[in-house]
Image (cartoon, grey):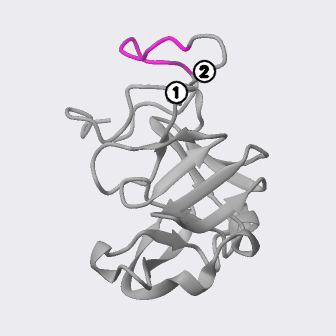
Amino acid sequence: MWHYRGQGRPPFAQEPGPGQESVWDYPRPPVPAPDGRRVRVLHGEQCLCDSRAAVRVLETASPPTWYLPPDDCELAGLVPVSGGSFCEWKGRASYFALRDAPQLGAVAWCYAEPSAAFAGIAGFLSFYPGKVACFVDGERVKPQPGGFYGGWMTSDIVGPVKGETGTGGW
């Protein structure tokens, strides 16, 4: 049972400083939020995406997941991988590997036909910052803990966040 839905921070939540956001102020169910900061995704010297038209998905207890418009991404560098997943909020996701480094497995995903609430991210790509280098306004993103999640940890986000040790009961 999910106990927190963004209406109030739990006692263990970190207090955000100036210019920071608490993941405990994000809503549940999640919401899309356009963001004009420059986002770059690199694999070595290869630029996979460069955009100022990202959409962050904000959800209680998780760092934002960034979705990037396909027109700003180098789609020829990606190949579909088998399998998929289903999000109760967004729908069915498809995954992609790097054409030149398939051994990394899935590095990105998208929702080709998301639910109505997320129609604005149809076809947008999100990348795992633990597998490729992701940057927001020049800051290197850290991956959300836990391996499965795709949230982007930046210095303006405070938690604790889902995926860290001991968070399974949230």
* Magenta region, main secondary structure: loop
For this view, does 97 lie left or right of residue 89? left
Q: Which image quadrant for residue 18?
A: top right
For this view, does 169 lie left or right of residue 59? left
Part of the protein shown in magenta: 8-16
Q: Earlier in the sequence, mark 2 or mark 1?
A: 2
Task: Name the amino acid, label 1.
Answer: Ser
Can you say which quadrant of the picture contains the C terminus?
Answer: top left
Q: Residue 99: x, y in percent?
A: 44, 85
> Which SS class for mark 2?
loop
Q: Residue 105: x, y in percent?
A: 32, 75
* Residue that carries the numbered disc 2 in the rendered image: 20
State the separation of the CA atoms marked 2 and 1. 8 Å
For this view, does 117 lie left or right of residue 148? right
Q: Residue 50: x, y in percent?
A: 69, 60
Can you say which quadrant of the picture contains the N terminus?
Answer: top left
Give the total of numbered labels.
2
> Which SS class for mark 1?
loop
Q: Residue at x 59, y 86 (%)?
A: 76
Q: In the image, which is nearer the foreground, mark 2 or mark 1? A: 1
Q: Is residue 104 above or below residue 36?
A: below
Q: Is residue 134 above or below residue 21?
A: below
Residue 155: image tag: 1
Instruction: Name the one closer to the observer, 103 or 32.
Output: 103
Residue 125: image tag: none
Task: Name the amino acid, label 2.
Answer: Gln
Q: Residue at x 28, y 54 (%)?
A: 147
Instruction: Name the one closer to the observer, 144 or 165.
Output: 144
Residues at circles 2 and 1 in contact by the CB criterion of under 8 Å = yes
